[in-house]
Amino acid sequence: MATYKKRGYKPKTKAEKVEAIEENSTTAEVFNTLDEGASKAEDWAVKNQKNIFIVVGLAAAIVLGYLGYNKFIAEPKASEAMNEMFTAQKYFDEAVTGTAKDSLYTLALNGGEGKYGMLDIVEEYGGTPAGNLANYYAGMAYLNLKDYTNTVKHLSDFKTDDAVLNPIAKGAIGDAFVQLNQPEQALEYYEKAIAASKNDYTTPMYLFKAANVALELGQSDKALNNFKRIKEEFSSSTEAANIDVFIGRAEAKE
């Protein structure tokens, strides 16, 4: 067993000399191993220094690029898109309240006065909030123009969590499918509209539409349930005015 020795101690016996040599040898091996490991690490760093800088540089570029994109490209582009949409939205609003509806809806879609229409906004600013909203306006314009295929296309591309616009968009897709004589798909979207938001305006409207399509499909139980929901939960709605008549029809078909 090795014993503690003071600094400057010189081994006297043969055994002590052997022990000192072994200790020195072991210490040397440890430091040699450490030196060798450090040297290998340094060599690896030197050889791969370019790759290291490339990886770090790419990571930094991605982060800075994302921040820069949002501030200097995405935000200004979103603002520009909203400004560009102003005239098309004006045409749409005039179509809703005016008399020359078809021509105004067409202007809303295609533009006028040298300004973009909703279709241009969708194409040029598709990744912005304005581009998304333009899909809603385009879909509703097509619905009023009786172009039901394009109604489905644009309203399906419109994404929102808004408590009114979300069910209206889905319900309008249901309306388009009714006109395309696809009642199964119509019922599916009316049910999506019902599930999207519960409110006194859209919920009873789409419950009523869903119930009537369900009756057409022979699903009287579903129709009856929807009619009863209108009576029990939305008694002051327009749809509730003659709801007992519709409940009677659904019960008669059970």
Image (cartoon, rainbow, N blue to C red):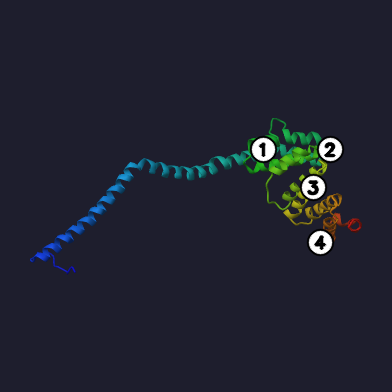
Decide which of 225, 175 is in the foreground and name it: 225
Quick one: label 1, few (<14), some, or many (20+) residues within 10 Å? Answer: many
Q: Earlier in the sequence, mark 1 or mark 4?
A: 1
Question: Could you give the CA–CA distance between mark 2 and mark 1, rounded to whole angstroms?
Answer: 26 Å
Decide which of 254, 203 is in the foreground and name it: 254
Where is residue 116 drawn, in percent x and y? 68, 34
Residue located farthest toward the left when viewing the structure as drawn: 12
Question: Could you give the CA–CA distance between mark 4 and mark 3, rounded to whole angstroms?
Answer: 25 Å
The residue tagged 1 is 122
At label 4, which amino acid type do we have? Answer: Glu
- Position of the C terminus, as image quadrant, is bottom right
Is 102 situated above or below 170? above
Task: Tell me if residue 92 can be seen.
Answer: no
The residue tagged 3 is 184
The residue tagged 2 is 99
Task: Tell me if residue 144 can be seen.
Answer: yes
The residue tagged 4 is 233
- Residue located at (11% from left, 63% from top): 17
Q: Earlier in the sequence, mark 2 or mark 1?
A: 2
At label 2, which amino acid type do we have? Answer: Thr
Query: Helix or strand or loop: what does disc 3 sit on?
Result: helix
Query: Helix or strand or loop: what does disc 1 sit on?
Result: helix
At label 3, which amino acid type do we have? Answer: Glu
Question: Could you give the CA–CA distance between mark 1 and mark 4, rounded to whole angstroms?
Answer: 39 Å
